[in-house]
């Protein structure tokens, strides 16, 4: 008479389950520590290796507004990196001007230019991001499949901005000693890495930004904790090459201007102060009573413009009669 095989089968299944669980836990721990090690890296040498040489410039005239010309500019380097920007320059002048390179929202270069009013005495170049994928309304599967291209776009933003600096310095109407990088919202997160990597940038403006990307993602995700915690960590790993807390201290001794809103729910005060404290002197910190980048309110434009222009003039980065009306848009509805 044979023995009952059921207990041994159950035991074998239990052993297999424990083995699989142990393997899964081991892989999770290994993945976590590998991700943490990746996040602690300084990526400036990597950015330098990615940087190419400006190879192609295509300028397309779009409009003449007052005494300024607006053009679309397409740049490409010898490694195939391509980026689009929108330029606003005085018409028919033979002077040299300070240049304000703007990193705003996704695909908002032309809209950023359109929100600007009188910009006499300054050249503006609003840069788009090197990402061509779908940006909103993504399903979970679409989001996961887009992660590699999103990561590439984050990393390529630094060499793309350097390509924009190459282009500006190639122009005879740009003052090479007054290149100002202005990052707003999304651009405020990315711009410290750009400024820390490229010493040709003479000053940095951070509008409505903050530090600790993982915390910012958790703040802005309206989902249960069991979803937001791993999603925020994954977002932290993807954006680790540009974590602003790592780079903002490396901008010194070039001046930095911080402008934030006291009612900005997307960038809480704690995250903003982390960034302020990580920056070294010389730095100027200003707060206004406003939320996060309110694009449809002229009074908001005036608040931002007034604070920014006053600082630029104080630093002698723009002429006394310059009036730069800056609206940095993050693309939010």
Image (tube, rainbow, N blue to C red):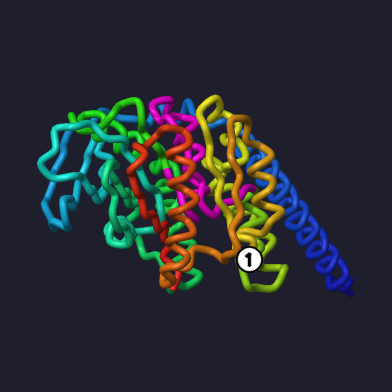
Q: Is residue 186 visible?
A: no
Q: Residue at x 85, y 64 (%)?
A: 11
Residue 227 or residue 118, whichever sits in front: 118
Specify whether residue 33 is painted magenta.
no
Q: Residue at x 60, y 63 (%)?
A: 289
Give SS at disc 1: loop
Instruction: Answer left or right for 42 relative to 94.
Output: right
The magenta stretch is: 182-211
Residue 172 falls in image quadrant: top left
Q: Residue at x 35, y 50 (%)?
A: 324
**Residue located beneath label 1 in the image:** 263
Residue 106 or residue 90, whichever sits in front: 90
Identify whether 232 is placed above or below 119: below
Instruction: Answer left or right for 28 relative to 79.
Output: right
Q: Position of residue 58 (x, y in %)?
A: 13, 43
Instruction: Answer left or right for 22 relative to 297.
Output: right
Residue 166 falls in image quadrant: top left
Q: Position of residue 108 (x, y in %)?
A: 34, 59
């Amino acid at each position: 008479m044979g023995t009952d095989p059921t207990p041994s089968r159950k035991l074998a299944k239990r052993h297999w389950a424990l083995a699989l669980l142990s393997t899964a836990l081991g892989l999770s721990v290994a993945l976590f520590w590998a991700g943490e090690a990746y996040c602690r890296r300084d990526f400036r040498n990597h950015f330098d290796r990615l940087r190419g040489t400006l190879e192609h410039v295509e300028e397309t005239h779009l409009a003449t507004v007052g005494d300024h010309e607006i053009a679309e500019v397409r740049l490409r380097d010898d490694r195939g990196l391509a980026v689009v920007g929108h330029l606003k320059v005085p018409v028919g002048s033979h002077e040299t001007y300070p240049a304000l390179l703007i990193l705003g929202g996704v695909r908002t270069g032309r809209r950023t230019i359109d929100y600007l009013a009188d910009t006499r005495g300054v050249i503006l170049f609003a840069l788009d991001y090197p990402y061509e994928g779908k940006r909103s309304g993504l399903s979970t599967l679409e989001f996961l499949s887009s992660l590699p291209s999103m990561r590439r776009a984050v990393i390529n933003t630094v060499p793309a901005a350097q390509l924009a600096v190459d282009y500006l310095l190639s122009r005879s109407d740009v003052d090479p000693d007054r290149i100002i990088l202005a990052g707003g919202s999304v651009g405020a997160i990315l711009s410290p890495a750009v400024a820390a990597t490229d010493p040709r940038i003479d000053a940095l403006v951070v509008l409505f930004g903050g530090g600790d990307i993982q915390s910012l993602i958790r703040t802005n995700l309206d989902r249960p904790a069991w979803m937001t915690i791993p999603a925020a960590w994954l977002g932290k790993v993807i954006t680790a090459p540009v974590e602003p807390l790592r780079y903002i201290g490396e901008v010194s001794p070039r001046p930095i201007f911080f402008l934030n809103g006291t009612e900005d729910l997307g960038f809480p005060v704690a995250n903003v102060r982390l960034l302020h404290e990580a920056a070294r002197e010389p730095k100027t910190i200003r707060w206004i009573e406003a939320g996060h980048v309110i694009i449809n309110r002229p009074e908001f434009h005036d608040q931002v413009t007034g604070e920014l222009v006053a600082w630029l003039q104080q630093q002698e980065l723009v002429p006394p009669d310059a009036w730069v009306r800056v609206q940095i848009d993050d693309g939010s509805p």
